[in-house]
Amino acid sequence: MGHNFGSLVFTPLVKALQEKYGSRRQYARMEANRGSRDHLGPDESAFIAERDSFYMATVGATGWPYVQHRGGSKGFLKVIDDHTIAFADFRGNKQYISTGNLGNDDRVALIMVDYPAQARLKLLGRAQIFEGDAAREWIERLREPGKDAVERAYVIRIEAFDWNCPQHIMSRFTEEQIREALAPFERRLAELERENESLREAARSVRQQ
């Protein structure tokens, strides 16, 4: 069943605080106008496909939330359909906190950020973990080139999402993005160096005559 993002996160206490600090009317209109946003559209799918990292929160049996960073090559978090995303879980430090938490409570919250574009997407969903023989098909579908140590597959059914305010997102750029931005200048610099060398050769020829 689809949910409005606000219906899951705007608890009575949250709404009371919104009322106290003057934002309740704005968010009430947002809830009324947006309706159910439980399926990913083209904008969300394209945004997810470009990410090389995200943060995922789970809740353990002690009631404490746990936030984990996940990273990989661009597009490692895959959109399976408009209600489902998935990623391969590679061998790491063997703490298994997120995996253990999901055995107790399957709810997850994800946040992913495009720092250069100052855009942020929040997702709420329920995660299912596939291991062993049950994971074979998923692992082949989610495997990344050059990485073989896939232990399990995380499959998340989206229940709601929201685009977050870009305020306070500081622009940051990856090494790849910086290289792409500098590439035209580096090509021009190489051209100028070749031109300078040609001019120096011509000058030497003139002096030798």
Image (tube, rainbow, N blue to C red):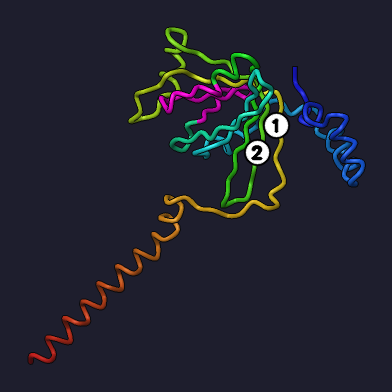
Does 10 appear in magenta?
no
Part of the protein shown in magenta: 77-98
Q: Residue at x 40, y 62 (%)?
A: 184
In the rendered view, tell whether residue 150 sits above or below residue 113. Answer: above
Residue pointed to by mark 1 = 161
Q: Position of residue 58 (x, y in %)?
A: 63, 25
Task: Place residue 73 in its image quadrant.
Answer: top left
Circle 2 sits in a helix, a strand or a loop, which is it? strand
Q: Is residue 51 left or right of residue 162?
A: left
Image position of 24 (left or right of 202): right
16 lies above or below 8: below
Asked whether the beta carbons under mark 2 and mark 1 sit within 8 Å of each other, the answer is: yes
**If the image is split into quadrants, where does the C terminus sit?**
bottom left
Residue shown at 39% from the left, 59% from the top: 183
The disc at residue 121 is 2
Q: Position of residue 149 (x, y in %)?
A: 36, 23
Q: Earlier in the sequence, mark 2 or mark 1?
A: 2
Quadrant for the N terminus, please: top right
